[in-house]
Image (cartoon, grey):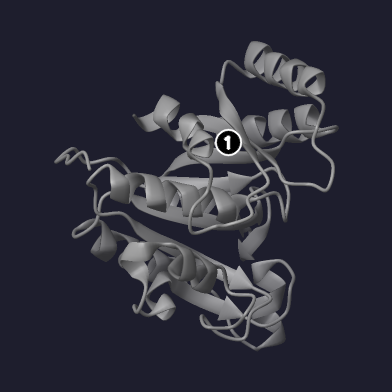
Amino acid sequence: MESSNKRIENLFIVGTDTGVGKTVLALLMMQFFFTKGYSPFYLKPVQTGCKDANDADSDARFIYRHVEQLKGKEPAESVIYCLKNPKAPLYAARDERKSIDLSKIERVVSKKAKTHSPLILEGAGGVLVPVAGKKLIVDIISLVNGTPVIAARAGLGTINHTLLTIEAIKKRGLKPFGIVFIDAGEMETPPGMIRENKSAIEEISGIRVAGVVGKIHDFSRPPLDYYKPLEKMFG
């Protein structure tokens, strides 16, 4: 284990779409930072489509199940709002006659940041998903002084989706730390297409694609190669 006293800013994982692999990237980052001697903390400000933090569909439960250092601890510590209907947080909250208090999210993040480094925050859906009033996921990144890390699909369509995500982030005065391709579909994306996608995104946006994470069969012990994109960004 490589110990480190260096503090890293709040890292906020955003996706180019829903179901793109944000939670898998969050898992790898938690495992990676624990191995490096940090004290990371996973936080999902808002999750929809779950009954509670211990629900089978809970992202926090998935993280706690597959990170050795978190086993036996309570996933509810990592979820601020858990809403039942699988839709944009603004509307999932309305369905339950609730509202999402952004100041509460800010307070929780500030408190956790005092005792953990880094915080690994995970958004809900893409960056322009509405959360409260006219506030979007991308606005939460600014609220918590987060640095975006983009999870993107590796295959067809990712150039457009990734560049639009970067454009929305930069418009708010933020700069992504990096991009990780997630290639977890039934069929692997051809290497040639991945190279083309990587080249186009990097040349147009100036943001580095750190690497590719393929399908994982044992989430408690992912292939070591899948940590290489994180080594490039944070090593």
The x and y percentages for residue 13 are: 52, 47
Q: Which residue is mark 1?
A: 169
Q: Is residue 177 visible?
A: no
Which quadrant of the figure has residue 92? bottom right
Q: Is residue 157 left or right of residue 24?
A: right
Q: Residues within 10 Å of mark 1 (few under 14, many from 20)?
A: many
Left or right: 216, with 141 as reference point? right
Q: List x then y, in percent, for residue 210.
A: 54, 26
Mark 1 belongs to which amino acid? Ile
Give above or below for 2 relative to 133. above
The answer to whether one can see residue 227 in this image is yes
Check the picture and name the quadrant holding the N terminus.
top left
Q: Secondary structure at mark 1?
A: helix
Q: Going 76% across and 35% down the picture, which residue do you hit?
A: 161
Q: Residue at x 62, y 86 (%)?
A: 51
Position of the C terminus, as image quadrant, is top left
Give whichever of 114, 218 is nearer the camera.
218
> Which residue shows up at 35% across the image and 79% down it?
72
Q: Is residue 135 above or below residue 222?
A: below
Query: Residue 23 placed where, x, y %?
Result: 57, 56
Q: Quadrant of residue 191?
A: top right
Q: Where's residue 171, x and y in %?
A: 59, 32
Outermost top residue = 203
Name which residue lies at 72% across and 84% down.
Answer: 95
Please name whichever residue, 191 or 121, is drawn nearer the observer in this view of the structure: 191
Query: Is 128 in front, or is 66?
Result: 66
